[in-house]
Amino acid sequence: MNAQAQNTSHEKDQIDRNVLILSKQKKETLFEGNKMLKRLIIQNLAIAENISVNFHEGLNVITGETGAGKSLLVDALCLLRGQRADTALIRTGHESAQVTGIFIPSKKNKEIFSLLEDLGIPLFDDAPEEIVIKRFIQRSGRHRATVNENLVSTKILQLISSDLIDISSQFENQRLLDSDSHTLFLDEFCNTIALHKKYLDKFNQSVDYLKQIKNTILEINLLKREKNLYEFELSQIREANISAAEFQKIEEIISIGNKANYAKNICREIDEILQSGETNCLSQLKYCKRNLEKLLKTTSQSQIKINTDQIDGIIALIEDFIHKNEITSSHFDVDESVLNQAENRIEVYNKMLQKFGPNIEDIEKYALKCEEYLDKTNILEDNFKLLVNYCENSIRETVNLAQKLSCERQSKLNFISSSVEQELAELGIPKAKFICQLKENGSDFSKVFSELNLNIKIDLLNAFSTLAKSGAEKAQFLLSTNLGIEAQPIEKVASGGELSRIMLAIKNVLFGDESMSVFIFDEIDTGISGNIASKVGKKLAEFCKNKKGQISRQALCITHLPQVACYSQNHFIVTKVLLDNKTVTKIIHANEEEKLTEIAILLSGETLSQESLAQAKFLVKQAHAL
């Protein structure tokens, strides 16, 4: 067996052992609390070979030297949140990595359990309060995720985990500089996320109706250009009242009539030759008979070899032939009125065939095409009326939802502003002026409505013209950190150190009674030190408590500052060690003595001194007292 196969086999055995251990540990009660990340297991992720950490409620501080692997915890949780998997994170020498998170959601968070039920993801029989999320990364790129051992897509994973994990990092803090995110913050505080989603669905529906109306108008206008022509041509075909059976019958009448006329003409020509022509046989014979009679009177009969009897015989034969010819001709008599009518009808048919032919079936098909075209135009016009009606109703509902959303937002503005100002004061920005305001949205719907010329109440259209995806307005945060300076958009005035504190202040206000399972604060101490760092640490500890001072939340904070670390309810130390010529990350849950030692090292650097240890004890004692 080659090295790669051995590694793969070893990884599978290790994962199977961990799954078995995990199954047994599910039955243990590590913490009887409302909401938390109960356990995080990381396998073969960068320098983390096999880490299992049991977290607790309250402020969980994570410290360690640079490069020890603290950020791997955040990377692991980001993977559980559905972040894009990077195969570069897989530990060298391994083909896969795995992250497992066991969460206990808040009992108040009924939405997460309803979501699982809607998605057909069952709960564990032996631990129905737990949600187990796993993420598997393969070098082959065939990554997968499971929730309660059920395969889910990345989109579903993101949907589920967004209700369980909130991560604040330097990147997350940068969201404050994006004014578009301010409306989301406001809706989260006002508990109007669901209302905004309902509004957005209805807004998108109204916009979709407007697009359909525009396309329908274009189609109707295009059809109308041809409508008159189709109506005229269809009226011609209908007026002609043609049919294949009649056409065949008319052709037969004309064919018979033509043949009869042809025969009758022959009989007429024979009659003309025999008796009715200017110089016909019968008159010529009678003329001959008269001349012969004259000859007989003047000449001896013995000299004449012919007689009138012979001529009379010939005349009798011709007269009999003429009689029979007349009888024959009478057999070919036709009703000229019927024939004329047939010829008139065939002329109509020929015109239709010349225009829409070449045969009767083509004319019928073209008539059907005209009917379908006109029916389509009529249906489109009827549908257009219905579409406008649907659009009007949708716009009315959208406007009503927008007004309701605006009222909810407006009612909380002053409270949010004053609450964040109070939080900022406690975080070392006492003169801060924080303003949460609403700005009207610009819209180009007025131009659209004027082009469409819809039969909808003008006041309704005017109201909709002010709307956008965010609603009738969007939120904007203004900040001034110095007395006497006018508040300006936060992206113009906030420094890096202020951003982390502003984000903490906003979250402390925002998640007043939030059901999120775990809050992650990474690099919350960027750009601060000393007294400000102490205030941030205190605020993080308070963040994990309710109004009665009881621990009610779980937060994980990665920090380098002793002023923050001293406020921890649980302290974890991350180190990297050399094991079998391999660098691996280890994480321990520090006891009180280990916590004091770690804080002392953070104060003095690598060298531990009695002075730093005494200072560490003072910081921890002071933090506990507060």
Image (tube, helix red, strand yellow):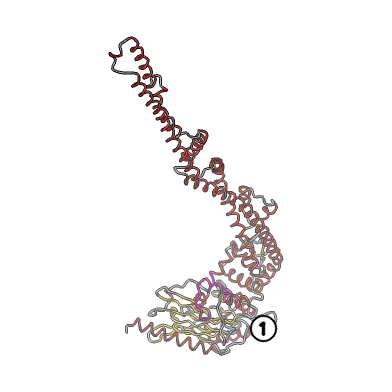
Q: Nearer the viewer, residue 565 or 507?
A: 507
Q: How many marks?
A: 1
Q: Position of residue 548 (x, y in %)?
A: 70, 82
Residue depicted at 55% across the width and 86% down the height: 595
For the question of whether residue 225 can be seen, the reply is no
Q: Position of residue 446 (x, y in %)?
A: 63, 50
Residue depicted at 46% across the width and 75% down the height: 144
Q: Hey, what amino acid is under mark 1?
A: Gln
Circle 1 residue:
550
Segment tinted magenta in the rendering:
147-171
Instruction: Answer above or below: position of 262 versus 24.
Output: above
Q: In which quadrant will I find the C terminus?
A: bottom right
Q: Position of residue 46 (x, y in %)?
A: 43, 78
Q: Nearer the viewer, residue 294 or 390?
A: 294
Instruction: Answer above or below: position of 139 versus 361.
Output: below
Instruction: Answer above or below: position of 173 versus 253.
Output: below
Mark 1 is surrounded, within 10 Å at the Cα level, by few (under 14), some (14 to 19) or many (20 or more) other residues, namely few
Instruction: Answer above or below: position of 354 versus 71.
Output: above
Residue 436 located within the stretch drawn in magenta: no
Q: Position of residue 419 (x, y in %)?
A: 68, 70
Determine whether, in the image, residue 244 is placed left or right of residue 320: right
Q: Nearer the viewer, residue 300 or 424?
A: 300
Helix, strand or loop for disc 1: loop
